[in-house]
Image (tube, rainbow, N blue to C red):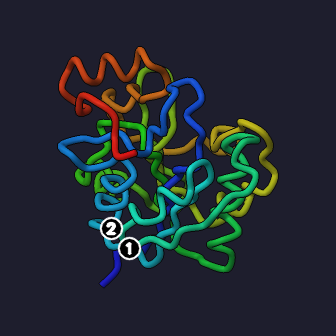
Amino acid sequence: MTGGHDAVILAAGGSQRLGQPKQLLTIAGETLIARASRIVAATRPGRTVGILGAHAERMCGQLTGAQAVFNPDWATGMASSIRAAADALAGRTDPVLIVVIDQPALDEAHLWRLLAAHDGARDTVTAYGDAMGVPAVLRAATLRQATTLQGDMGFRALWQDTLPATVRAEAFADDLDTEEDLARAIATGRVDRGRGPM
């Protein structure tokens, strides 16, 4: 039985600022992309797509229970991956759980909290500090609007008219964009020391 939602794993980035594919960093020996797909699968989506771009050939085997969708325009920014997800789920009407792979705090419990809080009247997102973002549960109608996004525009650009509901979780403020982010995550034991599989 499915949980009444679809899911998207955004994993297309080139990790330029980090200097190595963040998708292949590991937590307890599990790559971030494999970990994200496992956690998402535990919520029992009806359909899951993993959006791949940079190093895609090395990522396909890391996805569990997800359809790999290649985004040829990944280098233009996040918007192209969101558009690819919208295209892959065209015609679907269930809400869509969206995750990225570079948040060490990602866990199943938070995804269930988001899904439980989502009433269908508006999108439901994670709040941390002064920001709102992923993980998030979007209405299918919101994802359809993603065709209007360009460059590095993300979901926030779609929330001009109706602010989303929020589930606060400060730990999601930490991601793995830079070498400093990675060093801090290693020092605090949230990411394994050393590089992922080459």
The residue carrying pointer 2 sits among few (fewer than 14), some (14 to 19) or many (20 or more) residues within 10 Å by Cα, namely: some
Q: Is residue 27 above or below residue 116?
A: above
Left or right: where does residue 101 sit relative to residue 16?
left
Residue sitting nearer the eye, 132 or 48: 48
Residue at point 31% right, 17% down? 184
Quadrant into which the N terminus falls:
bottom left
Please name the residue that numbered disc 2 is placed on: 41
Residue 114 lies, in percent from the top left, at 36, 52
- Element at label 2: helix
Q: Are marks 1 and 2 in contact (CB under 8 Å)?
A: yes
Name the amino acid, label 2. Ala
Quadrant into which the C terminus falls:
top left
* Rendered image quadrant of residue 62: bottom left
Q: Residue furthest bottom?
A: 1
Residue 177 lies, in percent from the top left, at 49, 27
Please name the residue that numbered disc 1 is placed on: 65
Label 1 or label 2, whichever lies nearer to me, is 1
Residue sitting nearer the eye, 187 or 95: 187
